[in-house]
Image (cartoon, rainbow, N blue to C red):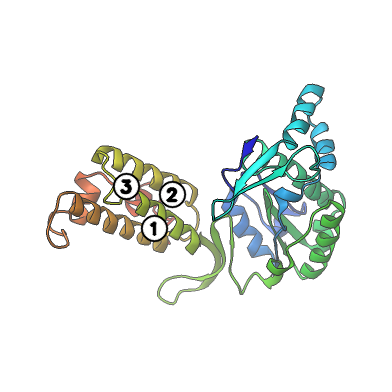
Amino acid sequence: MIRKLTSGAAGQLVSSKPRDKGRLGRLSDPTGRNVSEVRAGLERVDADLSKYFDTIPHADLLRSVARRILDRNVLRLIKLWLQVPVEERDGDGKRRMSGGKSNTRGTPQGGVVSPLLSVIYMNRFLKYWRLTARGEVFHAHVISYADDFVILSRGHAEEALTWTRAVMTRLGLRLNEAKTSVKNARREGFDFLGYTLGPRHLPNGGRWYLGASPSKKSVQRVKAKIGELLVPGNKGAWDEVRARLNRVLRGWSAYFFHGALASAYEAVDQHVYDRTQHFLRQRHKVQGRGTDQFSRDYVYGELAVRCLRRERSRSSPWALR
């Protein structure tokens, strides 16, 4: 039995693009490639698959897996694994069972191999896109990560969406129509893989450009993690608390290293300082706000809490635009 623990998915970032690299831009890194695609595209298709992990057909999925794995025992093990019962609990704590031998669809999101299987099945769509030269037909790119994907097109986004809807139906999948739309990529920003991509302006009334920055949700999530760690009820030694805090900040900044970072980094740094100051003031029973005892220089200096803007300016002075 598998207990469903998480709803997240891992995958491999894939871009299906026309071969004319000179016209449509060059891809370099996971987030940089999205920015270059936006520069090339006038319209975007925000596509969302409805219950992707729960609707992947087992028979078609196993055929895709069999093209990559020849060992019959491994294939049989994967087939059995897809049919194990899954126990879930709703918000009220009520138990719900799904899966089982009669189940012919879905791969449990809590399972360790589910992300890989989801990527393998999504590759059928990407491969068909390439084989039918949809990039040239629609003047478009597909940027995909697990079940998340965006189509950027020069003037053929509606056609690309219609084609995608039909192909997904053939694959036994369905688009979530309420969350799928066509928008102008040059005028409206959008969130993808934790970044907000779209139109931006340089500071002080500077020129308009297309760029990327950490999304508001991404900033709020890391703030929430920091808040959960720096609570008065945390009785761990300061060295341990600081190590965990710095790991969170290091991991977050390692992912969000591209684009316009100054405002997001400043917001996170300010939140870290406020929460650290409050945490230490409560722990040491200091009266007042504690700004004298726990100044910014003290927190980011002697206490060695990681400051994102300082670290970034040392490694790449051009990134905080």
Residue 138 % position (x, y): 81, 63
- Rate crowding at label 3 as few (under 14), some (14 to 19) or many (20 or more) other CA atoms within 10 Å: many
Residue to which mark 2 is pinned: 253
Q: Please, what secondary structure does the residue beneath circle 2 have?
A: helix
Say whether residue 137 is visible. Answer: yes
Vertical side of 158 occupied by 137: above or below: above
Asked whether 154 or 162 is in front, the reply is: 162
Numbered label attached to residue 150: none
Q: Are marks 2 and 3 in contact (CB under 8 Å)?
A: no
* Kind of element beneath mark 1: helix
Q: Position of residue 183 (x, y in %)?
A: 68, 72
Viewport quadrant of the N terminus: top right
Q: Secondary structure at mark 3?
A: loop
Query: Where in the figure is residue 285, as x and y percent of width and height?
Result: 14, 53
Location of residue 203 with respect to 59 vertically, above or below: below
Residue sitting at 32 percent across and 39 percent down? 243
Chain-order first, disc 2 or disc 3:
2
Contact, CB < 8 Å: mark 2 with mark 1? yes
Q: Amino acid at mark 2?
A: Ser
Location of residue 275 by image quarter: bottom left
Residue at horizontal 44 percent and vertical 49 percent from the top: 252
Amino acid carrying mark 1 in the image: Tyr
Q: Which numbered disc covers residue 265? A: 1
| Alpha carbons under labels 2 and 1: distance apart | 8 Å
- The first of marks 3 and 1 along the sequence is 1
The residue carrying mark 3 is 306
Residue 199 is left or right of residue 285, and the answer is right
